[in-house]
Amino acid sequence: MFLSSNRKRISRTNKLMYLVLKFIRQKINLKMLNFIIYFMNKKYVLVVDSGVGGLWTLKEIKRILPNENYVYFMDVLNAPYGNKSKAKLLKITDINFKKLFRIFDIKAVVLACNTLSSACYEYLQQKYYNIPFIKIEPYFEPQLFIGEPTLLLATKSTLKNNKKILEYKSSKNFYFKGFGNIAKKIDDCNGQYDLLGFYLYKKLKKFKKKNIKNIILGCTHFNYIKNQISCVFDFNVEFFENSGKVANQLFNVLKYSGKKSKCKKTGETIIVKKFKNDKKI
């Protein structure tokens, strides 16, 4: 009696499964099936900065990789990064990345912050060894600026931790200016960057007599205040920064690793400013 009852139950289950599969095969069209597969396999490129600076880099990335899905993490709670020690930045990054990797399926990371790149790139690359990391660094190619007075603007942390900058810090015709909280000031402007005109003049006026010809932007936030910086030097300077190079690096990494999206639709961008119940680290 027990065996007979069991057989009937199994038979009914098999019949139900057959009907479900038949329905799926008949009713779900190819487009819906592709959508389900896409949703289940959704992977993101993570772009990280303390504020709006990295959005400039993200714009360059999306220009050549429009079909990727992006998570832009804007760490407003711990901003600015520029006046923090390397140890503090490592702690902040460690905590944030654990949360981000737990929530999202990340296939590549772009550190769209020169400060973060200088302090944390090697550590993150070792910890997440199976994920490609792209870092942004100042466009510092001394051989391109030989004989021309060149000013590199960056955060104090970048000037302290970037090995390439340290190597050339005593070079002739190269000048360096570090800022502590400039990124926060730019974030707080809400697009009204002329408010920073006098502040920038006070910080940079001593370099006017150096006859500066080139300005290297060692912080992605500086892209938003190029006009105000140029004004200090009578609009007679040329700017250099690396967002375009970073975008090309990411394109090549995704292409040659087979991780480049095959989707033909424009990808989505999720902006994360903080996590639930987050506190300043």
Image (tube, rainbow, N blue to C red):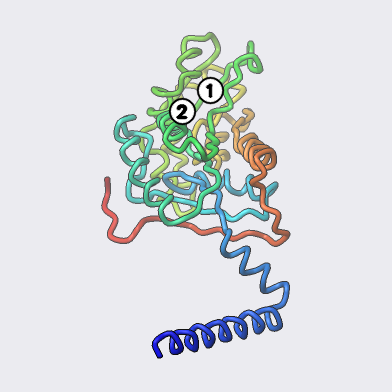
Residue at (47%, 40%) from the top-left corner? Answer: 197
Residue 236 image offset from top left, x and y in percent:
63, 28
* Residue 280: image location, x then y, percent: 27, 49
To which residue does mark 2 refer? 204
Q: Nearer the viewer, residue 87 or 157?
A: 87
Q: Is residue 277 left or right of residue 227?
A: left
Query: Of 94 and 10, which appears nearest the observer?
Result: 10
Which element is circle 2 on?
helix
Between 98 and 249, which is closer to the camera in this rendering?
A: 98
Give the side of residue 94 with respect to residue 266, left or right. Answer: left
Q: State the separation of the CA atoms marked 2 and 1.
A: 10 Å
Toward the front, the furthest residue is 1
The amino acid type found where label 1 is placed reads Leu
Residue at image location 56% in from the left, 82% down from the top: 14
Q: Is residue 159 above or below residue 6?
A: above
Which of the two marks, 2 or 1, is nearer to us in this view? 1
Count of numbered badges drawn on the protein: 2
Q: Which residue is mark 1?
A: 151
| Contact? badges 2 and 1 (CB < 8 Å) | yes
Residue 203 place in picture, x, y as percent: 42, 30
Q: Which image quarter holds the C terminus?
A: top left
